[in-house]
Amino acid sequence: NADRITGVWYNGEKTSKIEISQAKDGSFVGKIIWLSVPNDAKGKAKTDALNPEKELQSRPLINLQVLSGLSYKGKGKYVGGKIYDPKSGKTYSAKAEMPNNNTIALRGFIGIALAGRTDTWVRTTK
């Protein structure tokens, strides 16, 4: 069941919901569809302000693709992806494991997976 990863997921902090879908190339991608705090202090929609590319800093966080290129490897494991962290403006390699249908252990790392961090995402609804 490669596509069981599709759906809407809370990030570990429950500050955003990410919708994961299958791309045309068969890989899995995810975009932010909800934020617990969608606006900045001035009441404006939050943007990708920490992106290292100046021209991307004004794009809204809602509908921002943060997960790309995850491929199903079998036995609930996904590899070869990238995860973007708008809180740091950094992109990491990503892999994921689904111990059950309602949980994703998503690991972001640079270089080797041992030197990374795992965030547990929980299935939710739109």
Image (cartoon, rainbow, N blue to C red):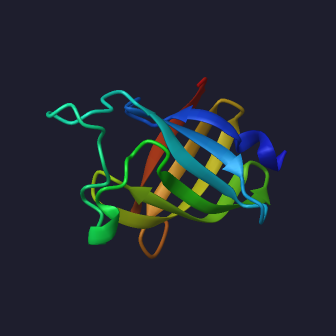
Drawn side of residue 24 relative to residue 123, left or right:
right
As rendered, which of 3 and 56 lies closer to the eye?
A: 56
**Image coordinates for residue 49, horizontal then vertical, percent:** 25, 55
Quadrant (top left, top right, bottom left, bottom right) of the N terminus = top right
In the image, residue 126 sits, relative to residue 61, either above or below, namely: above
Q: Quadrant of residue 85?
A: bottom left
- Depth order, front residue of 97/28: 28
The answer to whether any part of residue 17 appears in the image is yes
Left or right: residue 81 versus residue 66 is right
Q: Is residue 26 above or below residue 7?
A: below
Give the farthest residue toward the right: 1
Instruction: Please state which of residues 69 and 60 is positioned toward the viewer in this rendering.
Output: 60
Residue 115 seen from this side:
no
**Residue 24 vertical placement versus 62 (above, below):** below
Note whether 33 is above or below 58 in the view shown: above
Left or right for 111, reference 81? left
The image position of residue 35, as x and y in percent, is 39, 32
Question: Residue 122: where, in percent of width, then height?
Answer: 55, 30
User: At which x and y percent is residue 63?
Assistant: 50, 45
- Of all residues, the one furthest to the top in this rendering is 125
Residue drawn 34% across and 64% down? Answer: 56
Q: Residue at x 54, y 47 (%)?
A: 31
At horizontal 63% and vertical 44% (from top left) the residue drawn is 20
Residue at image coords 30%, 56%: 58
Furthest residue toward left = 41
Quadrant in the picture for the C terminus: top right
Q: In this image, 30 relative to 56: left or right?
A: right
Which quadrant would residue 72 be assigned to in this image? Answer: bottom right
